[in-house]
């Protein structure tokens, strides 16, 4: 398990020089790799490329990390194309690229963090009041460089029980969970409104940019305004997502959940055409980001996640298994009369699919609604009481 500490470090010529050198090395590696593939039909290994490409301006392990970043992107492409064959492999050239230091190039002495570089480049020295990180990365953060220090930690917490919870991700409701006893509905209204406003701002400014001459003063001012507004909204979306998912995970942990079964939405956007309005709703969902947050946060509490196919889970009655497509957010089975929240039915069936269990017996408890509030705690245990509606 690891966590990341981020700090703004400003902008200077040395960081520009190192980022430019990393970009040159990445581009050189990419061009040579595909040239060998094209002419020799040989797919070189990372070890071969690391011996081939190096830099006297960078620490040896920093240069290796640049090459490894390219092969990491290649691995991601190979995995992603299993579900989408039209995806392109890494091919874009980089002028600037992130600078990465491994443990061999990181030192702390007298309250200063020293990051070693090549023989021809002085070390980067920064004031530091934290412990020694296992890896450090510096990249462009929009207005200045941002340092990201990575720390590894042992998982100390353990799940309270052995329960299994189903998790249904959505657009109207951010997440709906069912653990066999209680159903929690995490409202996504705030997040959805931010995403819609973000799309609106982007479309309006992009339309105005298309009428301006590229490189002109007005074009530059509009572009700067666009970046400022979208970055602000990105931060707000990130804040909402973190606070909601942290509340969700701690709630499940307190309920004795050990395994969180997440409905698999990875192929949701492929070949989907449900009309202009609904297409926008589907494509503005950030279910992948929410799933990623849940997956790494449950590990800190000693829990684990599983992916489960969620096809027809919101249409299948958990009592009699009759399939019926409801209108609106309430589900009422046309065969047995079972009534429940539509997304709650989805989470019940996701859990049932994973367990292979039979039908729901008895009357289910009413769902508990959870709304986003700015004071919700983000990085530590947050109870459900302060956020329920």
Image (cartoon, rainbow, N blue to C red):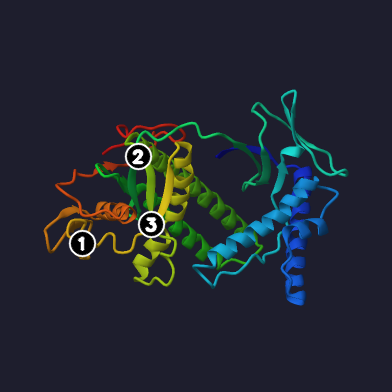
Task: Where is residue 135? Give x, y as percent.
Answer: 67, 40
Q: Is residue 149 left or right of residue 210?
A: right
First in residue order: circle 1 vs circle 2: 2
Is 384 situated above or below 27? above
Whole-angstrom CA distance, mark 1 to mark 2, is: 26 Å
Instruction: Report if the CB atoms under discs 1 and 2 are less than 8 Å apart.
Output: no
Residue at the disc numbered 3: 308
Residue closer to the observer: 142 or 121: 121
Coordinates of residue 151 in the picture (x, y in percent): 61, 36
Q: Quadrant for residue 359, please give it.
A: bottom left
Disc 2 target residue: 162
Q: Residue furthest bottom?
A: 39
Q: CA distance from mark 1 to mark 3?
A: 18 Å
- Residue in the foreground of this view, choosing between 276 and 77: 77
- From the viewer's side, name the closer residue of 291 and 111: 291
Distance from the alpha carbon under mark 3 to that under mark 2: 18 Å
Q: Crowding near pointer 3: few (<14 within 10 Å), some, many (20+)?
A: some
């Amino acid at each position: 398990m690891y966590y990341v500490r981020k700090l703004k470090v400003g902008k200077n010529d040395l960081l520009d020089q190192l980022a430019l050198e990393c970009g040159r090395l990445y581009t050189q590696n990419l061009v040579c790799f595909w040239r060998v593939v094209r002419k020799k039909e040989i797919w070189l290994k990372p070890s071969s490329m690391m011996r081939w490409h190096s830099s006297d301006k960078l620490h040896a392990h920093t240069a290796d990390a640049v090459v490894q970043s390219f092969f990491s992107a290649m691995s991601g492409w190979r995995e992603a194309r299993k579900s989408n064959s039209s995806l392109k492999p890494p091919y874009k050239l980089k002028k600037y690229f992130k600078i990465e230091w491994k443990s061999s190039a990181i030192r702390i002495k007298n309250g200063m963090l020293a990051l070693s570089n090549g023989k021809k480049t002085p070390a980067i020295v920064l004031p530091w009041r934290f412990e020694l990180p296992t890896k450090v990365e510096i990249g462009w953060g929009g207005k200045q460089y941002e340092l990201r220090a990575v720390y590894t930690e042992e998982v100390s917490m353990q799940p309270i029980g052995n329960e299994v919870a189903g998790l249904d991700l959505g657009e109207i409701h951010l997440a709906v969970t069912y653990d066999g006893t209680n159903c929690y509905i995490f409202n996504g209204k705030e997040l959805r409104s931010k995403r819609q406003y973000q799309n609106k701002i982007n479309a309006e400014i992009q339309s105005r940019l298309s009428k301006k001459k590229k490189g002109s003063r007005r074009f530059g001012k509009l572009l700067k305004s666009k970046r400022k507004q979208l970055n602000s909204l990105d931060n707000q979306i990130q804040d909402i997502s973190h606070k909601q998912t942290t509340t969700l995970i701690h709630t499940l942990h307190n309920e004795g959940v050990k395994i969180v079964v997440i409905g698999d939405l990875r192929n949701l956007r492929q070949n989907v055409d449900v009309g202009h309005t609904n297409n926008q709703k589907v494509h503005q969902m950030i279910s992948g980001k929410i799933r990623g947050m849940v997956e790494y946060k449950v590990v800190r509490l000693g829990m684990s996640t599983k992916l489960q196919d969620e096809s027809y889970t919101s249409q299948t009655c958990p009592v009699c298994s009759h399939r019926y497509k409801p209108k609106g957010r309430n589900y009422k089975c046309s065969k047995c009369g079972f009534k429940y929240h539509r997304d709650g039915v989805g989470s019940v069936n996701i859990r049932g699919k994973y367990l292979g269990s039979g039908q729901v017996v008895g009357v289910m408890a009413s769902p508990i609604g959870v709304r986003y509030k700015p004071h919700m705690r983000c990085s530590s245990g947050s109870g459900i009481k302060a956020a329920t509606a």
